[in-house]
Structure formats: structure tokens, C-alpha cells
Amino acid sequence: MHPVLIHIGSLVVPTYGAVTALGALLGLSMLLRTARIAGADAGKMWNLAILSLFAALVSARLLLVAANWSALRLHPQWLLGLAMVHHPLLAGTGAVAGGLCALAYARIVKLELRTAADALAAPLALGLAFEQLGALAAGSGHGRDAEPGLRWAITYTSPMALIWSGAPLGIRVHPVQAYAALAFLTLALLLLVWLPAEQRTGDVAGLGLMGAGVVIYGTEFWRAGEGRGVLLHGAVNGPQIAAVLLVVAGALLLCEVGQGGAASPCHCGQDTAAGATPRSTNE
């Protein structure tokens, strides 16, 4: 694949960063629409997204600096290359930091949390789809060795894929990032279509959490295990545990039908008159 998009002299533009940035821009554009549909303040949602992205990027890089501080003290110029390094732990740290930042900002500006989550669900899925396309080009989160005869298997040949992402060179592997990108894109479209028809605030967010969990859990079966952790004697890995938590969180959110965000027993199948918070739109 092609981890480097542009290389002119000392100028290097990584494909991963460029494609992920494109996904972020498209997600932000979609957020302006989904915020209006969900009934959230579009300006506040824009600020929330920008601050969360910044928190995710900074926290991941700070973790990388802390983990390699001894080497960086001897070679300060290596700081310039930190943005090229990819690792599952960095992604997880960024996701947690971004989520905490979003929660804090939403409380400060008094955004209704479930409404904000509804507005974010589809744009986040779209952004993740493009992030996985960037990962496909860079070799980040690469797939397991492909079975003989798998026609859509890919082979990484660029040394940068090995240096930046640890991708194996010259070995046919599953393009698992493409599987995940297609699944996340499908999820984004489904959530975008479902949002205007939503009857209970928080339903789209709950479905988004569950859908993301299913995508992450399922695609892990085709990913190589390096750097992803092993639990229960290899039965599951770290991302799969996180995926289970996402599914559980989504299911709990779908079952919260109390007024004003207060939780109450699940009344699946009842209409909004039974205590659910109704969906209002600004369109």
C-alpha cells in the first residue's frame, strides 16, 4: 500500500493523516446537519468536536513522548517523527481523552447529553470509516496472514509501513481496515437515515454505540494480534473488551426512557407517551 501520500525533498505527507483529516472535515460538515435534526446548538456541537479532536491528538502524542522519553532526550529531533507512529494504545488513549473532553464541555455549556450524542453518532461513524481507510494505506492495525487463494489480500512493500505501523512486508494479509471502513460507512448512513425518524432522544446514540461495538469486535478476528493485548488465554483481546463495553453502554442507553435523562426500567416497545423523551427536530 502507500503510507506516504506526498514526498518532495524533506516534505513528507503521510496518507494516514491526510485521509483521516479528510474524514474529520466530512464528519464536521455532517455534524452541522445532524445537530439541527437532533435539536442541538450547531455552534456548540462544532466547538465540542474541535476540542475533543484536539484533546485526542495531544493526549496520544503525550503518551508517546512519555513512553519514549529516554530516547527523545538523546535525540530531540525524533519528536518530529512522532506524528507518524501508530499503535492501538495510542488510539485508545485518544478516544478516552476525546470522550472526557466532550463530556466536560457539554456540561459546561449545558448541552443535553443524549441530544448531543445523537448528533455525534453518524459523524463519528463516518470519521472512523475514513480513519480505517488511512490505516489501510499506512498498515496500521493490519490484518492476519491471508489464506491461500484470497483474491482481495494485500501486500505491504514500503519500509515506512514497517517503521511507522509495524506492518509486515512481503506477506499477503487480510485488508481488515477495508472491512471496518465499509462497516463504519454503512453504520453512518443508517444512523443518518434513522435520526429524523427517531422517537426517543438517545436512541440513535445507543444504536451507534452498539453498532460500533459490533464492528470493532467482529473485525478483530481478522486483525493481527501484535500490540492489542490478550485476555482469557487468548479468547479476546483489548479492543474486543472495549467493544463489549460499547455494546453494553448502547443497550443501557436504549433502555433509559425517563424524562430529563433520568434512568428508569427498560420499556422496550412502548411509545413516547409511556415516559420516553420525544424527538423534536428543527427542520
Image (tube, rainbow, N blue to C red):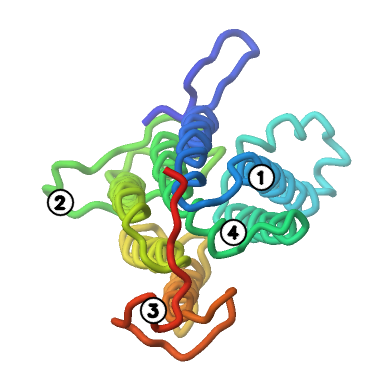
Question: In this rendering, which labeled residue sits more in front, label 1 or label 2?
Answer: 1
Q: Which mark is residue 92?
A: 4
Going by the numbered disc 1, the residue's amino acid type is: Lys
Q: Please tell me which of labels 2 and 4 falls first in the chain.
A: 4
Tell me what residue is drawn at x 56 percent, y 50 percent.
40
Residue 96 position by quadrant:
bottom right
Q: Quadrant of the C terminus?
A: top left
Residue marked by disc 1: 44
Q: Which mark is residue 266?
A: none
Mark 1 → mark 4, Cα distance in angstroms: 25 Å
Mark 1 → mark 2, Cα distance in angstroms: 51 Å
Q: Please tell me which of labels 1 and 3 falls first in the chain.
A: 1
Q: Horizontally, is 176 left or right of 166 in the view?
A: left
Residue in the foreground of this view, choosing between 282 and 264:
282
Report crowding for label 4: few under 14, some 14 to 19, many 20 or more residues within 10 A (C-alpha): some
Quick check: 41 above or below 275? above
Tell me what residue is drawn at x 35 percent, y 67 percent.
214
Image coordinates for residue 100, horizontal then vertical, percent: 69, 61
Question: In this rendering, which labeled residue sits more in front, label 4 or label 3?
Answer: 3
Residue marked by disc 2: 148
Residue marked by disc 3: 273
Image coordinates for residue 82, horizontal then vertical, percent: 69, 37
Q: Secondary structure at mark 4?
A: helix
Residue in the foreground of this view, choosing between 193 and 170:
193
Going by the numbered disc 4, the residue's amino acid type is: Gly
Image coordinates for residue 104, horizontal then vertical, percent: 74, 60
Pick out the residue farthest to the top.
9
Tags 2 and 4 in contact by the CB under 8 Å rule? no
Tags 1 and 3 in contact by the CB under 8 Å rule? no
Residue 144 visible somewhere in the drawing:
no
